[in-house]
Amino acid sequence: MKSFYHPNEALHHPKTYLSRGQMRPPQELPIRADKLVEGFARMNRLLLEPKDHGLEPILKVHDAGYLDFLQMAWKEWTALGPDWGDEVMSNVYVRERNPLRGILGKTARYLADGSCPVGEHTWTSAYWAAQAAIAASHAVLAGDKRAFALCRPPGHHARRDAAGGFCYINNAAVAANVLQQRYAKIVILDTDVHHGQGVQEIFYDRSDVFYISIHADPTNFYPVVAGFEDETGTGAGLGFNLNLPMPHGSDESVFFNRLNTALKAIEAYQPDALVFCSGFDIYEEDPQSKVRVTTAGIERLANQVSQLNLPMVIVQEGGYHYDTLPDNLAAFFKGLGV
């Protein structure tokens, strides 16, 4: 199985993280990429650098004004002088009736929360994470049964025109769109501990992409405003969005109960290809986790998903217990049988 990663993904280094009324130490740090790369080295597996497919595949998913903001925000922000912080981070969040005048006005629209500051290298890292997802998708288009994209920063919270939840470009959505060059019906299975409301929003009115998410109950837990069971799609997409939240504190049996429901839904949908959002923050010791999935459970998860026998692009999402990332990655690959 080909796996893709670009070293520039490690350049983004956030300094700020606002969550639940407190400034907290950032968790989505370059060490995440370092540890996953270490995991590949331990497995003696090759990581391929993705080719640059440009902005076009990303523009199929994201608003052009938003992407311009990600590219230029840090330069505009820091040009205003030393009274402005080292990172682009808003204290104003107003999306509607916003004329987008000045960098602070743009930030008020294009950053959804306090977990996604824009620094000097944010765009570069997010861009190459997306390129990894695009490269993995092209590998599957070319005939590979599976391909893995080591994406950092992650992507499933990124909206069409806003960053949030450590995410800037929605790598899974970009991958799904690329796969549709050959595969008409795509299922996106997301097992990160957080609901990927960005993916849901992008495909909510479509029947050709079925989004299924297994995640911790979003009540008072990110993303807070989406991920509930009654969100099933709209218009042509009605019935093609399935949220399977778990009570906080759930053990592994609850997770696999939800997975069984998801797999049955996938079989009923009869997709042509799968995008698998793999988040290791379901792991029992992860600082973000609200469930208790073991390393053996991560292996079991990968094994059960692999038995769908679909063309598959795996996109790395969360995972913040740094020291166990190599072990969990190894378990995941063992479960895939590759």
Image: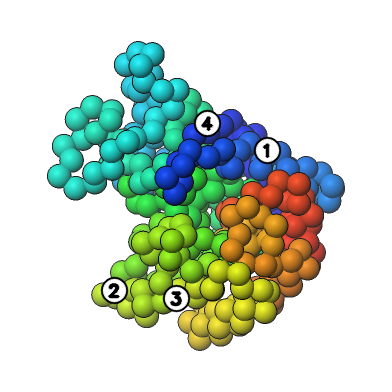
Q: CA distance from mark 1 to mark 3?
A: 33 Å
Which amino acid lies under the numbered mark 3 shown in the image of this protein?
Leu
- Quadrant hosting residue 259: bottom right
Question: Left or right of 92: which side holds 121?
Answer: right
Q: Earlier in the sequence, mark 2 or mark 1?
A: 1
- Relative to residue 177, is residue 120 depicted above or below? above
Image quadrant for the C terminus? bottom right
Determine which residue is flagged by label 1.
Answer: 31
Q: Residues within 10 Å of mark 2 (few under 14, many from 20)?
A: some
Does residue 266 appear left or right of residue 201 in this picture? right
Q: Quadrant of residue 236?
A: bottom left
- Callout 3–callout 4 Cβ contact below 8 Å: no
Q: Earlier in the sequence, mark 2 or mark 4?
A: 4
Q: Mark 4 or mark 1: which comes first in sequence?
A: 4
Of tags 2 and 4, the one toward the viewer is 4
- The answer to whether one can see residue 7 in this image is yes
Residue 320 lies, in percent from the top left, at 64, 49
Question: What's the image's color scheme?
Answer: rainbow
**Residue at mark 3:** 242
Q: Secondary structure at mark 1?
A: helix
Q: Secondary structure at mark 4?
A: loop
Q: Amino acid at mark 4?
A: Lys
The tag on residue 234 is: 2
Helix, strand, or loop for circle 3? Answer: strand
Please report whichever mark, 3 or 2, sits nearer to the chain's N-terminal start.
2
Q: Please state the horizontal and vertical placement of residue 63, each as a whole percent of the image.
A: 31, 46
Sequence-wise first label, 1 or 3:
1
Measured in 3D between alpha carbons, the distance from the residue under mark 3 to the one under mark 2, in whole angstroms, is 12 Å
Task: Give whichever of 169, 97 is nearer the camera.
Answer: 97
